[in-house]
Every structure is written in structure tokens, then in C-alpha cells.
Image: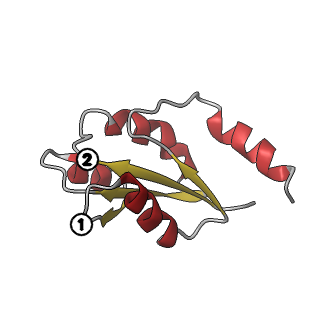
Amino acid sequence: MSKISIIIPTINEANNLPLLLSDLSVIQKEGEIIIVDCGSEDKTIDVANIYGAKVFKSEERNRGLQLDIGAKNSKGDWLIFLHADTRLTNDWLKKINLVLKGYK
């Protein structure tokens, strides 16, 4: 099975991030969650750490740069970029894996 890297750029997303990271919690063995933060002043980093996400910091407030940092530090065969306020269905990983099986 292909490994998936989920990359999430953040700035002050402590309110939204727990919901998304909860949705993503099923990926623990099949992938990684990468947070790239650009200077949050709230508890964003703490939330990411609680959920076991890998955290990287961007010196600039630049979403493109954040995505690039996440991609360069990812270990996955496939990259998925999400906004922190994204919500996923319960079967999202099953659907992703069905799509990925078509590429083998």
C-alpha cells in the first residue's frame, strides 16, 4: 500500500485543527500528517503535537512556501494538501485507497 502524506498549512488554526486531525487519525500506520505553521499565536502547535503531527515552521506568511516545506519534508508516495478547516467523511481513507489502487 502506498504511503500518504497529508500536508496542512496553518496560521492560528487551534479552533479548526482538532476536528480535521480527528478525521485524519485513521491514517496513523498508512501515512503521516505534516503541519507547516507560519507564526501562530494561539495553541495551533500544541494541538498538532497532541495529535502526533510532524510540525515544521515557515519563517514567512506564504502559503505556497508552507506547502513546499511540507512537500520537501514528506515521506509519502502521495501528497494530499488540506486546509485546516477541511472536514472529511468517515470513509475518506477507504476512498483514497481505492483511487490509489488504480495507479499501481
Q: Residue shown at 25%/47% (left/top)?
A: 11
* Residue 81 relative to residue 11: left or right: right
Task: Residue 22: name its quadrant.
Answer: top left
Task: Specify how the rendered protein is coloured.
Answer: secondary structure
- Looking at the image, residue 15 lies above or below residue 21: above
Where the C terminus falls, by quadrant? Answer: bottom right
**Cα separation between marks 1 and 2:** 12 Å
Name the spot of residue 103 as percent of width and height, x first.
85, 55
| Mark 1, secondary structure of its residue | loop
Q: Amino acid at mark 1?
A: Glu
- Which mark is in front, 1 or 2? 1
Q: Looking at the picture, how far across and down is residue 54, in whole percent?
A: 38, 63
Which badge, 1 or 2, comes first in the chain's sequence?
Answer: 2
Label tally: 2
Q: Is residue 60 visible?
A: yes
Badge 2 is on which residue?
11
Q: Is residue 32 left or right of residue 16?
A: right
Q: Which one is nearer the viewer's eye here, 40 or 93?
A: 40
Q: Which residue is mark 1?
A: 59
Q: Is residue 84 above or below residue 77?
A: above
Res. 29 visible in picture: no
**Image-based side of 103 in relation to 6, left or right:** right
- Residue visible at 38% across and 39% down? 84
Question: Does dot 2 land on a helix, a strand or a loop?
Answer: loop
* Residue in front for this viewpoint, 93 or 87: 87
Q: Amino acid at mark 2?
A: Ile
